[in-house]
Image: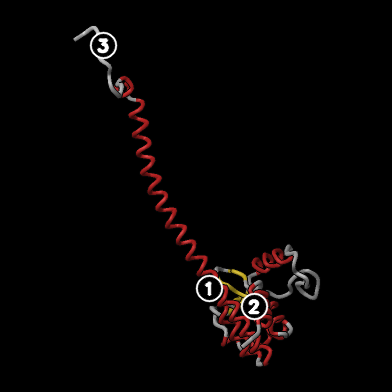
């Protein structure tokens, strides 16, 4: 049973990996340079292993970014204050288009790299994806509840609007303004 400090350390590592999960083309992905850092290999070695085993990476496991997507990624990363490593070894431009790995691609990558570090790191990567999915599901549940409350509020708001409009019409009608409500005191001279 891990101690509290070990649990905190493991959670910190998972959170660090979560920070490297992006949404690209509508999918949660990790980029080759981030996975190379996690698996403790050079990016070129990682890409070479993928190219040699391309049959293990169908399109739903891995895709290569287009030139426009690469430029967008480079701009967004260069604007990130917390980035403390260069984007590439040769200046600020990415030389080759990055690979984007889905959760399944990141796991498959560990089997291609065949190192103990890669196996251990893939467990952390999977936990990060799972934790992120659970958090998104929780947020989706909360969003669904808020939407339901908005519908109820809108419904009641519409009904209140109808009542308010009717009251306004009644109050503007002259026949209602002339009528007095309450007891009328009889005049003393007439019987």
Q: Which mark is residue 11?
A: 2
Q: Residue furthest top?
A: 189
34 versus 108 height, above or below = above
Neighbour tally class for label 1: few under 14, some 14-19, many 20 plus, Cα within 10 Å: few
Left or right: where 79 falls relative to 178: right
Numbered disc in front, either 1 or 3: 3
Left or right: where 82 falls relative to 139: right
Residue 110 at x, y percent in the picture: 63, 88
Q: Quick one: 131 or 186, which is closer to the camera?
A: 186
Which residue lies under the disc numbered 1? 134
Mark 3 residue element:
loop
Alpha carbons under labels 1 and 2: distance apart: 15 Å
Q: Which mark is residue 27?
A: none
Residue 74 at x, y percent in the picture: 71, 67
Q: Quadrant of the N terminus?
A: bottom right
Q: Quick one: 5 or 14, which is closer to the camera?
A: 5
Residue 171 image-quadrant placement? top left
Of mark 1 and mark 3, the one earlier in the sequence is 1
Of mark 1 and mark 2, the one earlier in the sequence is 2
Alpha carbons under labels 3 and 2: distance apart: 88 Å
Numbered disc in front, either 3 or 2: 3
Which residue lies under the disc numbered 3? 187
């Amino acid at each position: 049973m891990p101690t509290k400090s070990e649990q905190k350390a493991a959670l910190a590592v998972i959170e660090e990996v979560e920070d490297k999960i992006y949404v690209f083309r509508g999918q949660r992905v990790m980029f080759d340079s981030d996975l190379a850092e996690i698996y403790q290999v050079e990016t070129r070695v990682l890409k070479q292993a993928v190219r040699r085993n391309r049959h293990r990476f169908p399109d739903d496991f891995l895709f290569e970014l287009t030139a426009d997507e690469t430029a967008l990624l480079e701009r967004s990363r260069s604007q990130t204050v917390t980035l403390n490593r260069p984007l590439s070894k040769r200046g600020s431009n990415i030389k080759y288009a990055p690979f984007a790995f889905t959760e399944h691609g990141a796991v498959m990558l560990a089997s291609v790299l065949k190192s103990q570090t890669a196996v251990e790191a893939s467990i952390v990567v999977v936990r990060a994806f799972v934790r992120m999915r659970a958090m998104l599901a929780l947020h989706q549940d909360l969003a669904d509840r808020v939407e339901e409350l908005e519908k109820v509020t809108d419904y009641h708001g519409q009904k209140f609007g109808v009542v308010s409009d009717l009251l306004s019409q009644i109050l503007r009608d002259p026949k209602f303004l002339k009528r007095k409500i309450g007891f009328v005191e009889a005049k003393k001279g007439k019987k």
